[in-house]
Image (cartoon, grey):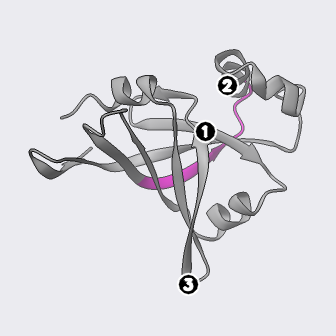
Amino acid sequence: MIDYEAILKQNPNGVLATQCGSEVRTRIFDYLFIEGNKVYFCTSSKKQVYAQIQANPSVSFCTYLPDFDPVLSINGKVVFVEDMALKTRAFDEKPVIKEIYGGPDNPVFVLFYIDIAEVQTFNYKEGPKTYTV
């Protein structure tokens, strides 16, 4: 298995893909932290991405190293989290979140994780690889 946690830590910015009706939508996202097979993110309950994930929780998060070796995709289903300790951890991990939401008890602040089903990688030498988690 590839060390996807190390790749995410080096490049926390990526693209999250969701389903919007019959079409796919992407947007820039930062991952927050990892616990086991759970990669954590946050958003606002007022954004379209929140409604899209509620309608269809299957998502993909893609990021890559500066030399594109490898490109990494995390695929799975989203689970929303109400655990205040984890919400507080998100604020500790990314202080900029406090500027946006004030505190972890803000009802607009939504924490979620991707329950990883598979990890896909690609590089030009070896091509694509898929790892089941």
Question: Does 128 sit above or below residue 11?
Answer: below
User: Please, is residue 78 above or below residue 33 in the view?
Assistant: below
Q: CA distance from mark 3 to mark 2?
A: 32 Å
- Are circles 3 and 2 on residues that touch, CB within 8 Å? no
User: x, y (%) of residue 55?
Assistant: 64, 70
Indicate the secondary structure of the residue bearing disc 3: loop
Question: Which residue does the numbered mark 2 point to in the structure image?
Answer: 90
Residue segment shown in magenta: 76-84
Of 72 and 81, which appears nearest the observer?
Answer: 72
Kindly identify the residue that appears in the image at 68 percent across and 22 percent down.
94
Q: Secondary structure at mark 2?
A: helix
Image quadrant assignment for residue 92: top right
Crowding at dot 3, Cα within 10 Å, few <14 / some 14-19 / many 20+, comes out as: few
In this view, 65 is above or below 80: above
Lower position in the chain sequence, tag 3 or tag 2? 3
Residue 41 % position (x, y) = 61, 39
Q: Do the numbered discs 1 and 3 sit on residues whose CB atoms are within 8 Å? A: no
Work out whether 62 lies above or below 4: below
Q: Nearer the viewer, residue 7 or 42?
A: 7
Mark sitting on residue 22: 3
Hey, what amino acid is under mark 1? Phe
Q: Is residue 17 magenta?
A: no
Q: Is residue 79 left or right of residue 65?
A: right
Q: Amino acid at mark 2?
A: Ala
How far across and how far down the image is residue 89, in percent?
66, 19
**Sequence-first disc among 1 and 3:** 3
Amino acid type, residue under disc 3 in the picture: Ser
Judge whether residue 80 is colored magenta: yes
User: What residue would you read off at disc 1?
Assistant: 41
